[in-house]
Amino acid sequence: MPRALSTPPVIRSGRLGSRPQPVVRADGGLLLRPWEDADAPAFLSAYADEETRRWHTRRPDGEPQVREWFEAYRRDWEREAGGHWAITRDGGGVLGRIALRGWDFDDGIADAAYWVLPAARGAGTASRALLALSTWAVEEIGFHRLELDHSTRNHASCRVATKAGYLLEGTKRSAARHDDGRHDMHLHALVRAARP
């Protein structure tokens, strides 16, 4: 039996899972929407890209597994464990993926993750999506702290985090395993009180 907290939770349980996952608008005509089964080919294509594969070691092995992941994403929302969105241009074709995972309503903490397809890179897609989702999570839902980490060798992800207001807090030594061995990971965070 879990121990009762001496402080109230930052976010009340039942606030998100009891309602549909929202669509979130971002600058530049971007729309973050829940994944649909028809998105499976685009999602799978991301993992055929060398850059995506370099930084993401958990990979689907085909469209059936992608659809299983989408179903797990829907369950995450219902259980209030996380939210997963397709980054699109006005709700159309998929440009990338963004997620807030590991929701901790007691402390008001979640972890951000993202990737974008090669055709969407270099245009600010990831940073605009991250900023919009972070704003929604902090200002509308009430999360206090959002974290993200990436390999210290992934300079593009570092730029995305910084542009979206996530401050670099430090380096987690040998914290993740990639295809080429263990990597140090940068830890970034956005804290409600520290927002611009």
Image (tube, rainbow, N blue to C red):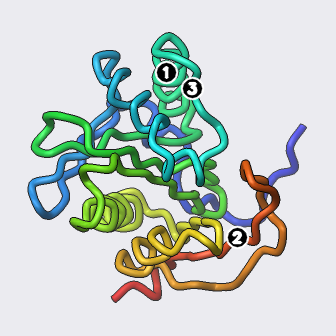
Residue 135's spot in the image, x, y percent?
32, 66
**Badge number at residue 60:** 3
Three-letter code, disc 3: Pro
Residue closer to the observer: 171 or 77: 171
Q: Are marks 1 and 3 in contact (CB under 8 Å)?
A: yes
Circle 2 crowding by C-alpha within 10 Å: few under 14, some 14–19, many from 20: many
Which residue, given by chain and number where applicable, does mark 1 sit on? 66
User: Residue at horizontal 56%, vertical 45%?
Assistant: 53
Residue 25 appears in the figure: yes
How many marks can you see?
3
**Badge number at residue 187:** none
Q: Secondary structure at mark 2?
A: strand
Three-letter code, disc 2: Met
Residue closer to the observer: 116 or 141: 116
Residue 71's spot in the image, x, y percent?
49, 19
Which residue, given by chain and number where applicable, does mark 2 sit on? 185
